[in-house]
Image (cartoon, rainbow, N blue to C red):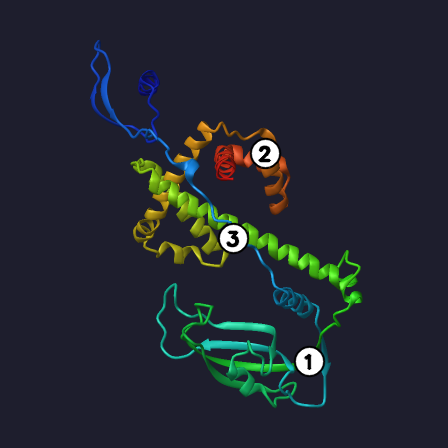
Amino acid sequence: RYFRKETEKQGLVPVSQPRVTDLHLQEGEPLRFKASFEVMPEVKVEGYKELRAEKPKIEVTDEEVEKSLEGIREQHATFTTVEGRPLTDGDYAQASLDGQPKGETPAGPGAPKPVHMDEVLVEIGGKNTMPEFSENLRGASAGDERSFDVVYPEDTSDQRLAGKTFTYKVKVQSIKTKSLPELNDEFAKELGEFSSLEEVRKRIREGMEAERKHDAERDAKDKLIVELIKLNEFEVPESMVEHQIDIRLDRGLRALAAQGMKAEDMKKMDLNRLRAGQREQAVSEVKASLLLDRIAEMEKIEVGNQEIDDEITALAKQSNQEPEAIRARLTRDGALDRIRNRIRNEKTLD
């Protein structure tokens, strides 16, 4: 209580817990102690009005629109079972497969795990099909079983498979052929509120342009922040950096958990090394936040209650919950201020 009163009296804003030393506590004598703590630095912002953002020209080619339309067409493909003949190029094997990592493999979080799929469609000779699958399943009939090895290249996108060899047992359940719908106005009507294929193309183009504009704006804002930090050097409180590292790590670990990483594997991770790796980015984020806060004060940029309500409504929609439940949780976690600051920073950047 006395610490809080004294900081208020001196106009100091603590951003860390005080480290109390030299505590003098004697009957009949005044309480005396020393407290060390970090305070919010004085942030002076210069040169921000001279900064300019690049505005690249947003273009979407006809070829890109057609490629996207072809992707939609692929999503609406139908598969028909064929009987009385073996698999040939262009066919799809509906199969179940079991894959075991071959040879001695180390245990631990990075070790390859067995692969099992009950129903998977394998395109024979397809450009995205591993060659070993095509070579070994070509000529097979429904009911046949095949065993073979697959060697995955080092640049395989799935890190669990990259550079590994797996032994697969594959059972062909049926043979299917793929049919694509015709690209015409009838197909457009099946997609929703479109009356013609040209309308679909127009919507695809608009969507791609909007996405590219958003990416370009985000990129421009990131560059502005880098320039802003270069123009305004100052020391940042260690406690704020540590807090930002906590936020970044929490976000990263949640993402790993969402991807299926188990808690016991997370416990084996070297947290000190992870923290050190996050430090540089955390310092930049704290600096950016403090600079944008100061600019918002100078430019009198505020966030209204309606903007907070809109954000809560959007979060509720995403998570399929009631807005009031979201608001109660955010209030309990002290996250409403963080949301307000984020919106304010975004408005300042805009």
- Badge 1 amino acid: Lys
Mark 3 and mark 2: Cα distance apart in space = 29 Å
Report x, y in % for residue 221.
47, 45
Q: Residue at x 80, y 59 (%)?
A: 195
Q: Is residue 242 visible?
A: no
Q: Residue at x 35, y 18 (%)?
A: 8
- Badge 3 amino acid: Pro
Label whose residue precedes the other's in the sequence (3 or 1): 3
Q: Quadrant of the N terminus?
A: top left
Q: Read off the residue under disc 2.
A: 307
Q: Read off the residue under disc 3.
A: 56
Q: Nearer the viewer, residue 334 or 178?
A: 178
Mark 2, other Cα within 10 Å: few <14 / some 14–19 / many ≥20: some
**Side of 130 relative to 86 (left or right):** left
Label whose residue precedes the other's in the sequence (3 or 2): 3
Report x, y in % for residue 256.
45, 56
Residue 176 badge: 1
Q: Is residue 122 above or below residue 1?
A: below
Nearer the observer: mark 3 or 2; the answer is 3
Nearer the observer: mark 3 or 1; the answer is 3
Mark 3 and mark 1: Cα distance apart in space = 46 Å
Label whose residue precedes the other's in the sequence (1 or 2): 1
**Side of 76 relative to 301 (left or right):** right
Report x, y in % for residue 64.
61, 65
Q: Secondary structure at mark 1?
A: strand
Mark 1 and mark 2: Cα distance apart in space = 52 Å
Q: Secondary structure at mark 2?
A: helix
Q: Secondary structure at mark 3?
A: loop
Quadrant hosting residue 40: top left
- Badge 2 amino acid: Glu
